[in-house]
Amino acid sequence: MTPDEIAPGQCADLSNSPASELPGGGAECSSNFLSAIDTSVANAELLCPALAFDPTGPYPSQCANFNQLGPRLPFIAVSPFSKPGYVSHSIGDHASLLALIEHRFLTINDVRLHLTKRDQFADPLEDMFDFNHAPSLNTPVGEAAPPTVDCTP
């Protein structure tokens, strides 16, 4: 099951609905093999040869989908709001950074806005931060001194 109904390697998007929502109908699905999407399609076909037989047809059930985790990636949160010495055990993914930004800054009247379904269901990783008791929360920020050498052209 895909979070946005677009299977891996079957580039589709909302660029020209409804045609572009079909597998292979997206704006970046072209014969230009230098585009990033074509590289993505080629990589998906290498990972699952069954996809190459019918790249615009139903996604082969034997191919890997979004139902498994990929390799572990280290993540270090460097922020004045980071909890010191804290190790998170939350499962995040690449969409977690978007989810964090959306949760912190795109919540209006307790309604969280999302860019895609992928970041809607991603863990926002907020357990790593303490936004209420940060050590430098009330530290004044001074003004930078003007340059000592005038480098105006």
Image (cartoon, rainbow, N blue to C red):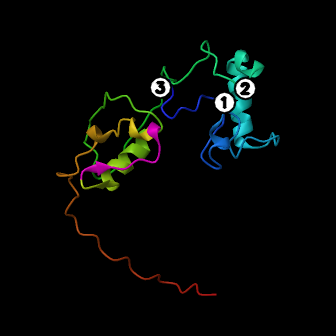
According to the picture, the residue beneath numbered tag 2 turns out to be 55
Whether residue 78 can be seen here: no
Which residue type carries mark 1? Gly
Question: In 3D space, how far apart are the residues under numbered discs 2 and 3 (Cα atoms)?
Answer: 28 Å
According to the picture, the residue beneath numbered tag 1 turns out to be 9
Which residue type carries mark 3? Arg
Question: In 3D space, how far apart are the residues under numbered discs 1 and 3 (Cα atoms)?
Answer: 22 Å
Question: In 3D space, how far apart are the residues under numbered discs 2 and 1 (Cα atoms)?
Answer: 8 Å
Q: Tell me residue 105's x, y (percent).
A: 33, 56
Q: Which residues are magenta?
A: 110-118
Q: Nearer the viewer, mark 2 or mark 1?
A: 2
Residue at 26 percent of width and 35 percent of height: 86
Q: Quadrant of residue 49?
A: top right
Q: Secondary structure at mark 3?
A: loop
Q: Nearer the viewer, residue 20 or 129?
A: 20
Residue contact between numbered discs 2 and 1, judged by CB atoms under 8 Å: yes
Whether residue 82 can be seen here: yes
Q: Nearer the viewer, residue 93 or 133?
A: 93
Residue at 75 percent of width and 21 percent of height: 52
According to the picture, the residue beneath numbered tag 3 turns out to be 72
Q: Is residue 47 above or below residue 77?
A: above
Please report whichever mark, 2 or 3, sits nearer to the chain's N-terminal start. Answer: 2
